[in-house]
Amino acid sequence: MFAYKLGSWAAGAAVAIGLAYIATLIAGFAQVGFAAPIGDPVLALMEILTLLSAPAIVVAIAVVHHHAASERKIFGALALAFTVIFAGITSAVHFVQLTASRQLGAAGFAWPSEVYAAELLAWDGFLGLGLIFAAAVFPGGGAERRLRRALGLSGVLALAGIAGPAVGDMRLQRIGILGYAGLLPVAFFLLARFFRTTDRISPGV
């Protein structure tokens, strides 16, 4: 089915973009350390990668919804709904940062700030919920079990990261980073492979 090919491409693209983001983030930390905020040009590249990742994640989760059995369509629908909200918020944040904020000389992420809070709501809150519901689409064993665990753990860790901005201790937010930067590429690698396998055994349409 074309849907599974599309899902495999999208999930694979999300993995590639995620790995590029991690490499860029490491380069940023190597440049300024952990105490100072990362600046341009590294920050601009990270924001561009984020803008590219959001639609890839949405497409992949849309195919998760397409794949869901009838009794689990509600989980797929919720996963897609929360992921679309995530993508809308983070895309708006980074488009504003890359355009108007830089022209106003006000670009950057430092806590506390309104744009940073919105960004964390997207990645920790809505993406975390989306991944948890996406995990519930896969009830089986074997590849489905591995995929369910990877998506679910990534989502739970991302959602736990919301504690950081909620209490004003950003060290707690690092839990969320582990979820969406550390485990999400692993989960989407498994998702891309699952879609490729499903495509091979599905009748063509």
Image (spheres, rainbow, N blue to C red):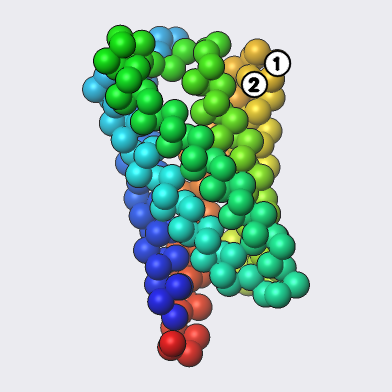
Looking at the image, which residue is at 44% across and 65% down? 7
Depth check: 50 or 153 in front? 50
The answer, for residue 161, to whether it is visible in the render is yes
**Do tag 2 and tag 1 residues touch (Cβ < 8 Å)?**
yes
Q: Which residue is mark 2?
A: 164
Residue type at tag 1: Val
Looking at the image, which residue is at 69% across and 24% down? 163
Q: Is residue 88 left or right of residue 32?
A: right
Which corner quadrant holds the N terminus?
A: bottom left
The x and y percentages for residue 97 are 36, 23
Query: Looking at the rendering, which quadrant does residue 96 occupy?
Result: top left
Query: Looking at the rendering, which quadrant does residue 121 occupy?
Result: top right
Tag count: 2
Q: Does 201 sit above or below residue 136?
A: below
Q: Which mark is residue 167?
A: 1
Looking at the image, which residue is at 52% across and 61% down? 62
Depth check: 138 or 22 in front? 138
Q: Residues within 10 Å of mark 2 (few under 14, many from 20)?
A: some
Callout 2: helix, strand or loop? helix
Residue sitting farthest toward the bottom: 203
The x and y percentages for residue 179 are 57, 40
